[in-house]
Image (spheres, rainbow, N blue to C red):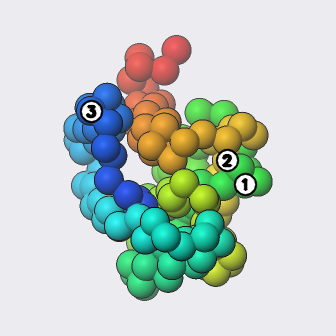
Amino acid sequence: MRKISFIWIGKLKKGWWKEAAEHYIKRLTPHFPIKQTVLKDAPGHLPPEEKKLWEGKKILEKIGPGDFPVVMDEHGKTMTSPQLSKKLITWTEDPATSPCFIVGGAYGLSDAVLAACRFKLALSSMTFPHEMARVILLEQLYRAAAIAKGSPYHH
């Protein structure tokens, strides 16, 4: 069973985001070992573009040689939950790599991170707060795992 990694920018500060994320991490864990890396937000005094660069540098330092970086990006590929399930199976069955899902901070991802990714995934064509994007991604990955196992969670 291949692991799934996550690189998140910023801690979840609100209780309801933490609760929701923990709920789906707990549900995902029987399907995949999970590794989470939470990186500090860029310093508040930086302008938005410099924040993206600062956070991007930190993200790139954490991507390992065996990682298959998948970034959440509004311009990425949209898919149905069953399509994501098939992709997840493909990514987790590859013996050379493991998927590493990346959610940037409030100002998005740097061009360097987008260039380093192997797949851009859009959760929607709408923009979500990064805390919400984290929870939606976790729920969709749990749903994808449930679909792959034939669980009735997805109907």
The residue that mark 3 highlights is: 15
Classify mark 1: residues with Cα within 10 Å, few (<14), some (14-19) or many (20+): some
Q: Position of residue 69 (x, y in %)?
A: 53, 69
Image check: 24 left or right of 138?
Answer: left
Residue type, label 1:
Gly
Mark 3 or 1, closer to the camera: 3
Q: Report which residue position mark 1 lands on.
A: 76
Q: Which residue is mark 2?
A: 122
Above or below, comparing residue 66 to residue 144 in the picture: below
Q: Nearer the viewer, residue 91 or 142?
A: 142
Q: Residue at x 32, y 36 (%)?
A: 14
**Is label 2 in contact with label 3 (beta carbons under 8 Å)?**
no
Left or right, residue 107 beside residue 41: right
Q: Point out residue 130 in the picture as x, y percentages from the top left corner.
A: 51, 47
Distance in Å between CA atoms under marks 1 and 2: 5 Å
- Secondary element type, mark 2: loop
- Classify residue 51 by image quadrant: bottom right
